[in-house]
Image: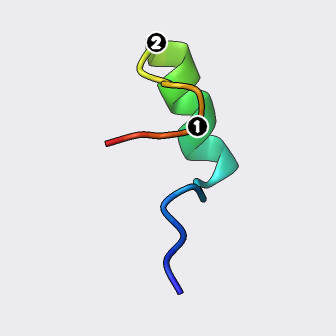
Amino acid sequence: KHDENYMPAEVAEKLKDTGVWKGGKAD
């Protein structure tokens, strides 16, 4: 089952590094 709030740690880190992280929700 797909959980829209789930994101692999490496992806989350990449988003944080690029400043795209929106506090848990990514489009």
1 or 2: tag closer to the N-terminus: 2
12 and 27: which one is in front?
Answer: 27
> Which residue type does callout 1 highlight?
Gly
Q: For mark 2, does the 10 Å Cα neighbourhood hold few (<14), some (14 to 19), or many (20 or more) residues?
A: few
The local secondary structure at tag 1 comes to loop
Residue 25, horizontal then vertical, whole percent:
48, 40
Q: CA distance from mark 1 to mark 2?
A: 12 Å
Q: Residue at x 58, y 37 (%)?
A: 24
Residue 22, horizontal then vertical, whole percent:
48, 25
Q: For mark 1, does the 10 Å Cα neighbourhood hold few (<14), some (14 to 19), or many (20 or more) residues?
A: few
Q: Quadrant of residue 10?
A: top right
On the rendered structure, is 18 left or right of 14?
Answer: left
Q: Residue at x 54, y 16 (%)?
A: 17
Question: Which residue has dot 2 on it?
Answer: 19
Residue 13, horizontal then vertical, whole percent:
62, 31
Q: Residue at x 49, y 28 (%)?
A: 15
Question: Which residue has dot 1 on it?
Answer: 24
